[in-house]
Amino acid sequence: MMSEAETAFSIRGLDLWYGKSQALKSVTADLPARSVTALIGPSGCGKSTFLRTLNRMNDLVGGVRIEGSVLYDGVDVLSPSTDVIDLRKRVGMVFQKPNPFPMSLYDNIAYGPRVHGVKDKARLDDVVESSLVRAALFDEVKDRLHESALGLSGGQQQRLCIARVLAVEPEVVLMDEPTSALDPISTAKIEALLDELKRDYTIVIVTHNMQQAGRVSDRTAFFLLGELVEYAATKELFFNPADERTENYISGRFG
Amino acid sequence: MRNGAKRSQAVAFGAIRFLSVLTIVILGLILGFILFKGLRYSSVERGTVLAMAEREPDGFVVVVNAGRDMETASWDELYGMFSDEYINWAKLDGGADDLLPVAVDPASEDGAAVEAFLFGSEDAGGYPLWGGLVRFAPTAAEALAIVASTPGAVCVVAADSVVAADGVVPSAAAAGAGGVKTLGIRRLAVAINSDVSDFVGDSYLEDLSDDDLEGLFSGRIRNWAELGGPDLAVAPLAPPEGGALAAAWERAGLSGSGGGSADSGAEGMAAYLSGLYDTSGAVGPAFALDASLAGIPTAWLTRRVSGWNLTPRFILEAPRLSGKTGGISSIILNTLFMVLLTMAMAAPIGVAAAVYLVEYARDGRVLALLRLGTETLAGIPSIIFGLFGFLFFVDVLGFGFGLLSGSLTLTLMILPTIVRSAEEALKAVPRSMREGSLALGATKLQTIGRVVVPAAMPGIATGVILAMGRAVGETAALIFTMGSDYQLADGLFSSARSLSTHVYLLFAEGVSFDKAFATATVLVVVVLGINLAAKRVISSMSRSGAARQGNA
């Protein structure tokens, strides 16, 4: 299944239960580094759950039981002895709804470096600026860095959240339907941004929008009822699906 | 069908509008009533002399230091000043100074005249009852000098001696020239024959209002029974024409029937007084001293007086005589200390407890028990907290009645409120905010301290401010724990009185109804101020959560 690219995540036989209901069924996949992997599938198919397993955000939900293995860069992500703080620093996450903190733009972006111990003001200034530049937001907000982040538009807020993640210098950025709450123009900006970001970062993106998956991703995984039905290069999956269920889904027969 | 729905909607809308307007009207009534009663006093004054004041009774003037807050004195007050009934000015003008009555030495001619004026001449049966406080000065000029230099001094001198001494004309003295001013003296009383004033069976003459007096002297009231007295015909007598009494009576505006005897000399006066003494049912004007020397009772008079209740002085001065006079400055400060102390204890503990309950405690029996506990505590009457505080803080821990015991009790009382509101505020912080922080690799403690609590700050602050309002307004929990000393507290263990306790005590002990309302007004304004300040703080907080983070 794996192509020539270097592997970021290596997932083997991943099972996950919320209480008694099984949300992931024996998922096995290798996610390549420095490329965009899209996760698609109908609501409740387990794609978000799968994403949140990659940086252990599922820890926050009660009653979760996980079996199988997830290796990231040789580290066993699921092991209780894994340093979750360090893992999340390396594997950042952008959420479905923009969630800026109720503080200034500057403080939002400096938040990550600050909690990791950076106090030097000049360095923080640098990080804030470069993160905003990489998130393609700097020009729009450079004059109001010290105003509340809640005053930004939805699209700007989402790019701010991306900048906030980039500020802690992660290797992977997980995105959970990052454009589902945004207008088409903002969505286009973020999609363009993804193209830039994949040169330096491994990106895993959950999306409801198959056109989006087609536009932005290199590889696509199709989930259905907790099962990884098909995982292939995006073009192949869209134009020549191996599984009938995939074909039905992408041709709009359900979902 | 559609019309019916429309109509019921209109009815519901009208009801809602009516109720909200009603609520506003009720609120306005309450606030308006308290403010009105607090700002203006209007009470019934009771005394034996009429309101009319004389500047130069019988050619004498009563001189006080120009700084006194008093314009007129009744004859009883003047008499009391020189016979040791008063030792300070608290009951006279509400001031704090000691009283120093000054008189010219009675051995001198001037002094003898003053003595006769104050206590009555020996011929008329007077007897000099100088009090021990009185200081005698050799001359009127020296007496005036003492008054000018002593805030609490008062003296009686012949009017012409004031002019003679230092050129101060009495009326000009009122303007502050020479550091002294004159007091008007109210001495005109209504003398009644003792047959009228005595108990007859179960009937007794009521206090006489201005209206009653007018009726008595105009002939409208013909029988004392109309005023609750015995069944006797009213016999109004007029004072001898041309004398000082007739002049005063004229000015009082009651000399309706007119036509007294023409003899204004001593004999005519004596005849008039014996007429009052002898004639059953007689009533007529008389100077208080003359009436008492002649053994004629004087009627109790009532009149309505009003004026400013809440003055700057009231706020800036310390209370005296249990708050009957003076202001409430020390009580305002004590309240401030109490609130600061309480909030310093309750706010950190309450917020910490809420953080624990929301962020750390696992749902289960202990948590349910804790929640039940805080909810129950929030509903317990504050007097119960007072009893507990008395037993535990005052008695068992031995803190005694004081600021500390009171504040600790208040802390226990308002903790549930703070915990509950902070809990709600923390719960209202969206989970996405917490996830956002955790996903950046922040620890749980960092997330709580840097994101969750700041985001919940407006809500937490609201709860804390509301609790503060409750603390300011609390009375029952403080009566048993903080004591009731109205002086400024001088330490944690010092007994102190808060504004609301002051209102309660002024009212419950019947000290002063007017001062209670004035204090209540201050209390209302303080609470209003706290709420407005809180609103501003909160709105500025939620506008930019930025300032706190110490950016740039």
Image (spheres, rainbow, N blue to C red):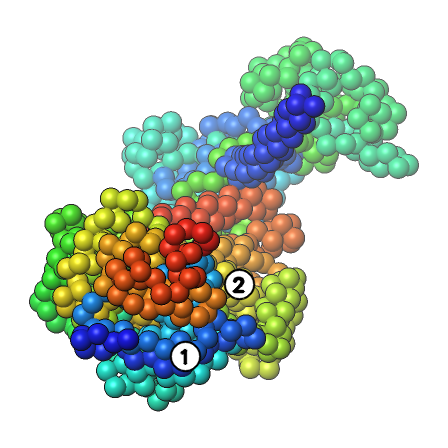
Estimate the spatial distance between the alpha carbons at disc 1 and disc 2, rounded to whole Å. Answer: 42 Å
List x then y, in percent, for residue B47: 64, 36
List x then y, in percent, for residue A30: 29, 76
Check disc 1 and give the amino acid type: Leu
Circle 2 residues within 10 Å: few <14, some 14–19, many ≥20: many
Asked if residue B28 lies left or right of residue B68, the reply is right
Residue B502 occupies which quadrant of the picture? bottom right
Q: Is residue A111 above or below residue A156?
A: below
Residue A6 occupies which quadrant of the picture? bottom left
Q: Is residue A111 above or below residue B398?
A: above
Secondary structure type for disc 1: strand
Q: Which residue is mark 2?
A: B420
List x then y, in percent, for residue A200: 14, 68
Q: Which residue is mark 1?
A: A14
Q: Is residue A48 above or below residue A210?
A: below
Check disc 2 and give the amino acid type: Arg
